[in-house]
Amino acid sequence: GMGGVGKTTIAKAVYNEFYDKFERKSFLEKVREKKVEKLQKQLLSDILQTTKTRVSSVAAGTTLVGERFRCLRVLVILDDVDDVKQLDELVVNRHSFGLGSRIIITTRNEHVLNEFAVDVIYRSQGMEREEALELFSWHAFRSSCCPRKYLNLAREVVDYCGGLPLALKDL
């Protein structure tokens, strides 16, 4: 989905709801902004539950993921991925993890998901007008309802934002 539609918020909600059902878990935010080596180190540290994990190269990190995670039931969320190479280097493939593992990827680029051959794609949509008006009201007026004297203006703002939660919050 497009930027600001709530992909990260949805991913965080899923993580918070289900993380305790998995042996190990990792939430890697803003993948496109970080170096793969740093992300691999965080992933390995989160899943192996150690801070002593050393990654000498991207290839070594990829090998470690492929070798060490096969028997573990993990939840891994990769937020804001923009290149399939990042997925290849971080999660290798679906067979790198134990039975029942879940890998959730957020991206603006559906082709990344298609190229990685994911099982299911969920396309984030903008909010419905009434939901959007309520979200805007919470941020603008600290109430679920917009004061009557601002209702027309609030509706214009909601229409202008096209149902994008981040835009509604920022405005």
Image (cartoon, rainbow, N blue to C red):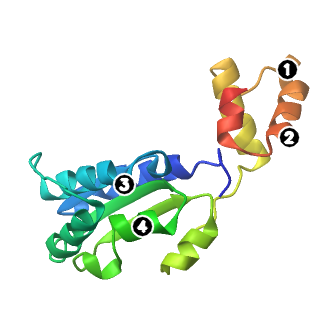
Q: Position of residue 105 (x, y in %)?
A: 47, 62
Mark 4 or 3 closer to N-term? 3
Secondary element under disc 2, as helix, strand or loop, is helix
| Mark 1 vs 3: CB contact within 8 A | no
Q: Quadrant of the C terminus?
A: top right
* 142 vs 106, nearest the viewer: 106
Foreground label between 2 and 4: 4
The residue under label 3 is which amino acid type? Answer: Val
The residue under label 2 is which amino acid type? Answer: Asp
**Circle 1 is placed at which residue position?**
150
Secondary element under disc 1, as helix, strand or loop, is helix
Q: Position of residue 117 (x, y in %)?
A: 50, 81
* 94 vs 63, nearest the viewer: 63
Residue 36: assigned label: 3
- Vertical comparison of 122 with 147: above or below: below
- Vertical comparison of 60 with 133: above or below: below
- Residue at image x 22%, y 71%? 63
Mark 2 or 1 closer to N-term? 1
Report if residue 144 is visible in the image: no
- Vertical comparison of 111 with 127: above or below: below
Inter-mark Cα distance, 2 to 3? 39 Å
Secondary element under disc 3, as helix, strand or loop, is helix
